[in-house]
Image (spheres, rainbow, N blue to C red):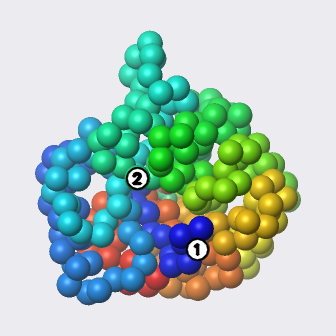
Amino acid sequence: MKQSVKLIAGNWKMHGLTASLAEAQALQDAIKAQSVTCRVALCPPATLLDRMRSTLVGGKVELGGQDCHDKPQGAFTGSVSAEMLTDAGATLVILGHSERRAGFGETDADVAAKVEAAIAAGLEPIVCVGETLEQREAGDAVAVVSAQVAGSLPDSLSERDFAVAYEPVWAIGTGLTPTLEQIAEVHAAIRSAIIARLGQGTAKTPILYGGSVKPDNAADILATAEVGGALVGGASLKADDFLKIIRAA
Ligand code: PEP
């Protein structure tokens, strides 16, 4: 297991055109100048991966996809396979993001199949889980998230590198965040669920927090028990903001 340092990953979603390469370059330059010790990753739209690899050559910013198909190739119009992400320069991939679960009907079983495909292609999956506001208000957050972990992690992960991201659906893009106690409670439950599913070998698997992480709340969140990093949406689009979050790690 290679991770003991924190992983700060940016999810650009469907934002970013070629002009955004300048933000990635600025980020990389600043990271180099400031001897950052945590892992830093950017997950841009798949069309930018190859150009970003060329732009960022020689630096420490890792690249990731935002989704992949569970098959290596085939008649799947519009889809991108894990191998294709690897070929384009990715070493990680976000899977099971709530925007994919809710907007594209992805089930835990779908996510598990994609995780297997990612592992087979040599990618490090970041497997997202998180409850809706309704589920939290019903007192079901821990049960929902634990079940998502159990259903989204395939057996093949036991000896592999991967991360889980706790992203409460109601915190994504809203400016709302759980309390630090709530984050600690769910992260502890996720740790137990990962170990129950895959064994003690996963006791150090990073569990990231995601959902409205900003420069002004990053330090507190990243200092919370069992928080092994952050998955950052909106605040990863501007190098200055993302850098402040990276510095907080
Ligand atoms: C995300 O989409 O993964 C995310 C965490 O978004 P934001 O930081 O904008 O809430």
Compared with 107, 6 (above or below) is below
Is residue 45 visible in the rendered image? The answer is yes
Circle 2: residue type:
Thr
What is the secondary structure assignment of the residue under circle 1? loop
The residue singled out by tag 2 in the image is 91
Relative horizontal placement of residue 229, taking residue 132 as reference (left or right): left
| Precedes in sequence: disc 1 or disc 2 | 2
What amino acid is labelled 1 in the image? Gly
- Say whether marks 1 and 2 touch (CB < 8 Å): no
Rendering quarter of residue 42: bottom left
* Mark 1 to mark 2 CA distance (whole Å): 18 Å
Say if 202 sits above or below 11 in the image. below
Residue behind mark 1: 228
| Image spot of residue 231 (x, y percent) | 49, 62
**In the rendering, at what x and y percent does residue 43 appear?**
37, 53
Depth order, front residue of 120/146 = 120
Whether ligand 1 has any atom under 8 Å from the Cβ at mark 1 is answered as: no
